[in-house]
Image (spheres, helix red, strand yellow):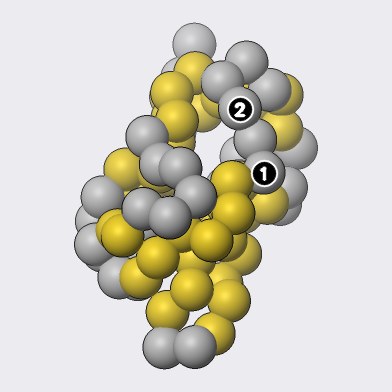
Amino acid sequence: MAREIVEVPITGKIISVDVKVGDTLQEGDVICTIEAMKMENPIMAPVSGKVTDLQVKAGDLVSSGGVIAVLEY
């Protein structure tokens, strides 16, 4: 199986997490939402696959380049 690592695109705060480990996602499904500069930015699945690792939770402060989730497809 191939793995896709979903990284934090912009420094901010996680305001919601919409998936859990084991969920199957379609490309474009929202994984979480980051608030940065008073804007809400949905982070979407770049590929269809299964969530095998989730490294954020609501309230976390995240930096660009950090890992949000790992998807296997």
Secondary structure at badge 2 equals loop
Please report the residue visible at 49 percent of the width from the left and 18 percent of the height from the top: 52
Residue 28 lies, with reference to residue 5, above or below; the image says below
Q: Residues within 10 Å of mark 1 (few under 14, many from 20)?
A: few
Q: What residue is shown with label 2?
A: 20
Q: Which residue is found at the position 68% from the left and 51% from the top?
A: 30
Q: Is residue 7 left or right of residue 17?
A: left
Residue 38 in picture, x, y percent from top left: 49, 88
Asked if 29 appears above or below 55 in the picture, the reply is: below
Left or right: 10 in relation to 24: left
Q: Quadrant of residue 70?
A: top left
Q: Amino acid at mark 1?
A: Asp
Q: Position of residue 7 (x, y in %)?
A: 36, 50
Callout 2–callout 1 Cβ contact below 8 Å:
no
Residue 69 in view here: yes
Residue 33 tag number: none
Q: Amino acid at mark 2?
A: Lys
Q: Which residue is rendered at x = 49% and y = 50% of the image?
A: 58
Indicate the secondary structure of the residue bearing disc 1: loop
Q: Is residue 73 something one can see in this rendering? A: no
Q: Which residue is nearer to you in this view: 62 or 59?
A: 59
Quarter where residue 21 is shown = top right
**Residue 29 pos. (x, y %):** 72, 47
Q: Quadrant of residue 3?
A: top left
**Which quarter of the figure is the C terminus placed in?**
top right
Q: Give the class, few, some or many, for how many residues have Cα within 10 Å of label 2's Cα (few <14, many ≥20).
A: some
Q: Which residue is mark 1?
A: 18
